[in-house]
Image: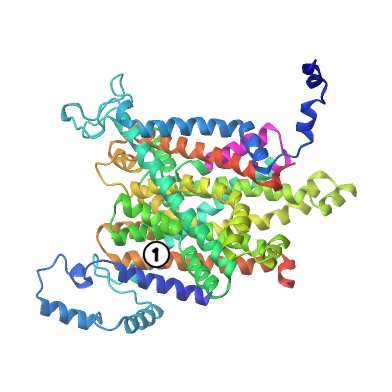
């Protein structure tokens, strides 16, 4: 009989509906329902797996030259042909995913961390610290970011590491400006004034109240910055200021392909399509994150 | 603005002094080997042995006189080289901005007016591709299609006669416009949507004004302000893109000048071009601020 009592208890579904859902749960559900986001996630997953297991899945060694087999058109053996040194372009494309994704993630991680930290410090403490940080931001922002990155790479010498350092150095300002603005208005809210009044330390206020509030916006911006870093890195590598030969990288593959445009147009097409697919899938995710995390867009 | 110009020149000065290696040796790299004594004498003559603050003040006064030093590669004045190439960069960027406005405004506005229809979806997909395609690769694709296959347009360099010049400008400027196209379309749509939801637009409709009159006489002028903001704010990004695209199409602007100078280790050209780029950004932002007060009286009264 005891079982029957459980069956008679009020419908559990009603309780579920009444209980308010948490912010992250709503955001997660909204994100999952977004078809584009799922497509972006799926494509990105494939790219990440390709980058990780490049050694296993690429049909040829991307660095093995074969002078008996140069400038081959696409065929069953070489899906998108071979380059001027007889290297398999498809294998190089797979290895290129490694470089591009690494640049995107590292540059974004660096500029997010530094940018958010300086933005919080500037906005929360104000005064001289704020002034110094914001003047620096203003100066860096007066330069076209890509031009400043090019100049820094030019000064320190073209290499993949210098490229990442330069991009990281110019991108943090975007985060600092945004986060500082948010912190300035957060600082005046009642609950933070209240937290101060009951004696919470600056450290506690920043970690318990400020950071959780700026987090959603920062996540969105960080996801877009991955896409932007990949585009910028490809452009710089195309100019010869990033990955150096023989590194398999999409931008430098495009610059190699220029000589062969007439006879092997596929070499000019494929790496660009790869960049586009990568950036597009990241932007899909970024758009969905913005829709899911921005409460003002919710109905 | 003045402190910003000051900050930007200071940053450029710092950049020059970050260059590893001795400037005299860099300058003389293709000449015969110099003795230590000779190097010291040249350094003295160029003032490189002076303390940094002295060098800084001299650098600033020289800049005010328009003296940016001498190019290692061409042996001519850096300021002369930049001034000669600057008009080409300005023509390229201005043409691109016009293209962006001509394309992005109608697309964005129509997609706002037809919100939720297939037109809106198509326009927003177009905008998403616009921000996701690497612009320089888009240029290579245009080159491939309109230059190599169809043979309609020149792919590299700059035409001499006015008609040839205009034809050679088409592909680079279309390519460069891609950098802002997606973003401006999105902003045009969202700012139009926002204005359409305001009370005065509803009032205008309630008065019985026609849809065209309300949309274009009442709503559009106010929707243009955020578009001006984004175009001016993204002007720096446009210049950054111009550097790469000038290189792709062999367009003789200051972007290509800078990139070519990098590989010739002509550092004074590189750093001063970067400075000119920053000054252009500052001037455009200032001009926009002034423009605001003309087109929006509310800003003037604040």
Residue A277: horizontal and vertical position, in percent? 46, 35
Determine which quarter of the picture holds residue B55: bottom left
**Outermost top residue:** A1
The quadrant in which the C terminus of chain A is found is top right
Relative side of B297 to A201, left or right = right
Q: Does residue A189 lie above or below B106 as drawn?
A: below
Q: State the predominant SS element of the stretch in magenta.
A: helix
Q: Residues within 10 Å of mark 1 (few under 14, many from 20)?
A: many
Which residue is more in the foreground, A13 or A154? A13
Which type of secondary structure does the marked residue at label 1 adopt? helix
Residue A284: horizontal and vertical position, in percent? 55, 38
- Residue occupying the point 46% across, 73% down: B7
Give the magenta part as a residue range.
B112-130
Residue denoted by label 1? B274
Task: Report if residue B115 lies within the magenta region.
Answer: yes
Determine which quarter of the picture holds residue B144: top left
């Amino acid at each position: 009989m005891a079982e029957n009592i459980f069956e008679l208890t009020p419908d559990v579904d009603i309780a579920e509906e009444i209980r308010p859902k948490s912010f992250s749960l709503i955001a997660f559900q909204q994100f999952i329902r977004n078809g584009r986001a799922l497509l972006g996630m799926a494509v990105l997953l494939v790219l990440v797996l390709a980058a990780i297991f490049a050694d296993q899945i690429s049909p040829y060694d991307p660095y093995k030259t074969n002078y008996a087999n140069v400038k081959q058109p696409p065929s069953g053996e070489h899906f998108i042909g071979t380059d001027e040194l007889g290297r398999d372009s498809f294998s190089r494309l797979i290895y290129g995913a490694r470089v591009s994704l690494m640049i995107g993630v590292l540059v974004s991680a660096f500029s997010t961390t530094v940018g958010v930290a300086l933005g919080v410090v500037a906005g929360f403490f104000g005064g001289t610290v704020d002034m110094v940080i914001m003047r620096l931001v203003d100066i860096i922002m007066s330069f076209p970011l890509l031009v400043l990155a090019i100049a820094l790479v030019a000064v320190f010498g073209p290499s993949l590491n210098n490229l990442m350092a330069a991009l990281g150095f110019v991108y943090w300002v975007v985060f600092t400006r945004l986060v500082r603005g948010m912190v300035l208005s957060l600082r005046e809210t009642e609950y933070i004034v209240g937290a101060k009044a009951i004696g919470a330390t600056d450290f506690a206020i920043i970690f318990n109240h400020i950071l959780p509030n700026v987090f959603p916006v920062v996540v969105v911006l960080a996801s877009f910055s991955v896409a932007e870093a990949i585009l910028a890195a490809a452009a710089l590598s195309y100019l010869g200021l990033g990955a150096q030969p023989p590194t398999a990288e999409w931008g430098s593959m495009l610059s190699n392909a220029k000589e062969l445009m007439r006879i092997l147009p596929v070499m000019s097409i494929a790496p660009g399509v790869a960049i586009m697919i990568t950036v597009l899938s990241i932007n899909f995710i970024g758009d969905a994150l913005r829709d899911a995390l921005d409460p003002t867009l919710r109905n | 603005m003045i402190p910003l110009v000051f900050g930007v020149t200071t940053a450029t000065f710092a950049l020059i002094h970050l260059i590893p290696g001795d400037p005299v040796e860099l300058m003389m790299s293709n000449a015969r080997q110099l003795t230590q004594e000779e190097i010291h004498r040249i350094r003295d003559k160029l003032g490189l042995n002076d303390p940094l603050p002295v060098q800084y003040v001299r650098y600033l006064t020289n800049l005010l006189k328009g003296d940016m030093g001498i190019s290692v590669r061409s042996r001519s004045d850096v300021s002369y080289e930049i001034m000669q190439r600057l008009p080409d960069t300005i023509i390229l960027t201005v043409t691109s901005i016009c293209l962006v406005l001509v394309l992005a405004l109608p697309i964005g506005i129509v997609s706002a007016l037809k919100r939720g229809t297939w037109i809106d979806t198509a326009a927003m997909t177009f905008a998403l591709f616009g921000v996701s395609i690497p612009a320089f690769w888009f240029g290579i694709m245009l080159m491939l299609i309109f230059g190599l296959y169809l043979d309609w347009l020149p792919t590299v360099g700059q035409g001499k006669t006015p008609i040839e010049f205009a034809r050679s400008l088409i592909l680079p400027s279309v390519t460069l416009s891609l950098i802002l196209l997606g973003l401006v379309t999105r902003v045009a749509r969202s700012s139009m949507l926002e204005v359409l939801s305001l009370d005065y637009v509803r009032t205008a409709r309630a008065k019985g004004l026609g849809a065209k009159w309300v949309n274009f006489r009442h709503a559009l002028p106010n929707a243009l302000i955020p578009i001006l903001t984004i175009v001016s704010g993204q002007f720096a990004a446009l210049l950054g893109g111009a550097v790469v695209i000038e290189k792709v199409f062999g367009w003789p602007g200051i972007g290509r000048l800078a990139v070519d100078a990098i590989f010739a280790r002509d550092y004074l050209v590189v750093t001063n071009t970067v400075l000119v780029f920053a000054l252009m950004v500052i001037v455009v932002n200032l001009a926009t601020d002034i423009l605001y007060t003309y087109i929006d009286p509310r800003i003037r009264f604040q």
